[in-house]
Image (cartoon, grey):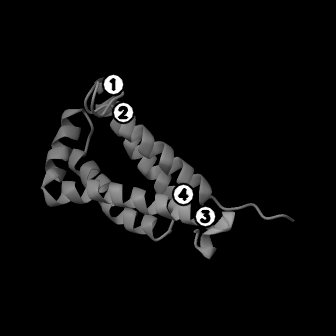
Amino acid sequence: MIAPQLSSSPSRNELGWLVLRLALSGLIAVHGWTRWLTGGVPIFGEWLTSQGLPFGYAIAASVTGIEILGTVLLATGKIVAPLTLTFAAIYSVGIYMVHAQEGWFVVGKGRNGVEYSVLLIVALLCLGLQHLPRKTAN
């Protein structure tokens, strides 16, 4: 039996987008918190510098901060569209710099490929579209 709140399409729609927003927030937050708590920010920064980027540590710290603080805002439904674009840009750069050379698969027929990042990006962009300002009728 479906709960009365879920018997209408708008209610299911809202719940579905909420679940997706919270799931994405959790997945991305774990990424940032793990880097922060395990001392990975300097390592990430050194790697970025070794790839020819200036200010590698600042970039690494910024990405980590966005992954930690931005996910709190995302989870609470604040500035969703700009955050989803920001996260999609970060993971697109990750595909370019790391994952594309490894192929498609994360596991199985390959390792460390693009498939997970592509899924995150698509989900983020779909979520962001849902949070664009609605045009009102005149």
What is the spatial separation of the Cα atoms under label 4 and label 2, in whole angstroms?
Answer: 23 Å
Label 3 CA crowd tier, 10 Å (few <14, some 14–19, many 20+):
few
Quadrant of the image containing the C terminus:
bottom right
- Callouts 2 and 1 close, C-beta under 8 Å: yes
Q: Is residue 29 above or below residue 43?
A: below
Q: Amino acid at mark 3?
A: Arg
Q: Where does label 3 land, which residue?
A: 12
Q: Nearer the viewer, mark 4 or mark 2?
A: 2
Q: Is residue 8 above or below residue 109?
A: below
Residue on which the image places disc 1: 103
Crowd rating for badge 2 (residues with CA inside 10 Å; few <14, some 14–19, many 20+): many
- Residue 49 in the image, given as x and y percentages of width and height: 20, 39
Residue marked by disc 4: 81
Q: 31 and 116: which one is in front?
A: 116
Residue 29 coordinates in the image, percent (x, y): 31, 59
The residue drawn where x is 48% and y is 58% is: 20
SS at circle 4: helix
Res. 114 mark: 2
Residue drawn at point x = 18 percent, y = 39 percent: 47
Which amino acid is tagged 1? Gly
